[in-house]
Amino acid sequence: MATRDTLSPKEAQCSSGAEYAALALEALQEPADAAYAKELMDRVADDCQFTKDLAACAIAYKALGEQARAEELLQTAEDYCMSGEEQIALAEAKFKVLGDKAAAVGAYEKALKETGNLDPLIDLAKNVMSVIADGAFARKVLEKAEAKISRAVEYSKLAAAAAQHLADKEYAAAIFNKAGEKLSGVPDLLSLASEVTKTLGDPARAKALYERALAGATDFTAAKTLIESAKQAGDAAFMQSALQKAGELATATGEYIELAEGLAGVGDKTGAAALLDKAEDAVAGLDEMQKLVAAVEAHLTDDAERLARVKAKLEKRQANHARYLEFQQLEKDATRVKQFLALAERVRLELEDPFYAAKLIESAENLLDGTGYQFSRYKPIILAVDANLDDTEWLSRLLDRAAENATDFIAFKDLVVTAARLKHRELGVARARAYLAAREAALAANPNATVYDTAKLAEASFAATQDATEAGRLLEAARAQAKDHYALTHIGRLYASMGNDARADELYASAAAACPNGDACIQFIDRLKGFALPAEALKKWYAACGAHLSKPADKLRWAEGIADALNDKTWATEAYGEIAAQFSGVDAARFELSRRSRASLNFFGANRRH
């Protein structure tokens, strides 16, 4: 038997009562050496001053069959107990020495109150299970830990503890569920998904987390993480989804090519083609063009049209490498829409490269997106696409978007005129007519639409298509709505602007006849003056307006208009003379005052001489 003078190697490593107690318990294993175990305990027990050492020695004496000595040390251990860690040692000793589970739980409760961090709480739960196997209390311990964590790694560690130490996979799943609800970052969700697979072996639950991560990815780096996770999980479907998501978030040619190769590798040629389309649009140099051609040759050899196109682009870049570098620097320096559009036209004219021109025009369009739609700002984009590209799909999209946003007449007229005069004339005229028809249908369905709305539509129609017949049809519809001289005059002016003077005269005649009084006649002639009609025409229509007036007061107001509106004192003198006899009494005084201020003074001088 080893003595104090001849220490065994294991004894030499012991420095505390707990370590000696562990060695004593080891000595009691088969083949048991109880004398050696007792000698070890007797050597150190009286010198112990810490609860952990005293509790361990009490357990060892219990194993030696010395219950009284064990209880004595246990009491001393409890007297010295001051910390949560010591309460754990005390709980184990109370259960193993006294067989008192309730006392052990009491000590564990005290330990729980003083323990706040994740790892110590997990260790406490583990100890509870190893000593008293109380799953309910161990879960209580982990629930306290649950309230103190916020990171994916902490939730995963806690769930693993529930599954491993409590053998409670249901609780572990609940922990993962809460983590999934609280966490939204892609790395966190991917970490959780991996741990769910490892801890629960539940691919369905892990897949839900992968899908949330997929939906939440907002940048290419996050999407690349998804791809790596899919590789590790060996999930081909998720891999394909991750590659597609990354394709949506990628911006550079190299990124698109890398992802396209990944999709081609899982058999998704359609997805690979879509990404190579984006790669083609994003090419920014000769080396990227070469990589693109290589990728198409490797993965889309059956797409002859694509292969021919990218090879043609490569040849053009190789032949004009210096010029491309120059233009790419100009592209890099461009900050305004006009700069990109001017550069696109130069690229078309000098390099004859519609693909690069399209990329520049797209950059110009991207500068405008998100700034609030105004047709005047997007119109240069439409004209640039029309002039530099043969892309009717893009052109149609731009025109349709403009139509959706053309809420005022000025923008709408500008749109249909612009569309009808495009280089792609057939498309433009068809689109213009479609927008005009849609606007006409909307007016027909609008109870608040006015005669002026219809007249404006006719004006826009003729400005766009120069189709007098169609515009005339709309003007006649407006004529049917016209109720006063204002509307009739307006319609007449539009007929005149279309070159239909005869119909314009008919409308002016109707407008003159619609004037109910002298003031209306003056308003009518003021409108006609704004149309820059010759003096003879103005006199004609004013005379027509006055001819149907019957009340002396209206005739006087009409006569005043000859002088005021037309500045024709000779005609005014004649008009006053023709109506003078219709006034008497107070009205005569009013008449004379008006004539004196507006008509020829010679009349009054001659009158005085008689």
Image (spheres, grey):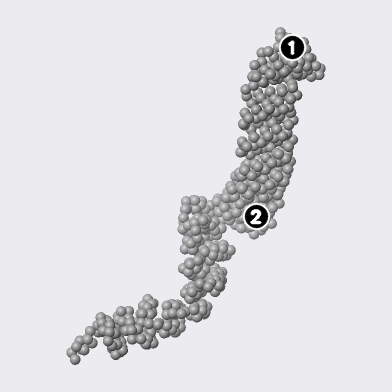
Q: Nearer the viewer, residue 151 or 399?
A: 151
Q: Which residue is mark 1?
A: 39
- Tell me if mark 2 has few (under 14), some (14-19) or many (20+) residues whose alpha carbon lies within 10 angstroms of its own: many
Image quarter in which the N terminus is found: top right
Quarter location, residue 359 = bottom right
The residue at the far top in this view is 5
Q: Nearer the viewer, mark 1 or mark 2?
A: 1
Residue at 66% of width from left, 36% of height from top? 143
Answer yes or no: do the residues labelled 1 and 2 have beta carbons within 8 Å?
no
Q: Which residue is mark 2?
A: 273
Q: Nearer the viewer, residue 333 or 192?
A: 192
Q: Position of residue 556 (x, y in %)?
A: 32, 84
Residue at 56% of width from left, 58% of height from top? 355
Q: Position of residue 160 (x, y in %)?
A: 70, 36
Residue at 35% of width from left, 86% of height from top? 551
The residue at the far left in this view is 609
The residue at the far bottom in this view is 610
Judge whether residue 148 can be spotted in this image.
yes
Q: Position of residue 332 (x, y in %)?
A: 49, 51
Sequence-first disc among 1 and 2:
1
Q: Position of residue 91 (x, y in %)?
A: 70, 25
Q: Nearer the viewer, residue 545 or 41?
A: 41
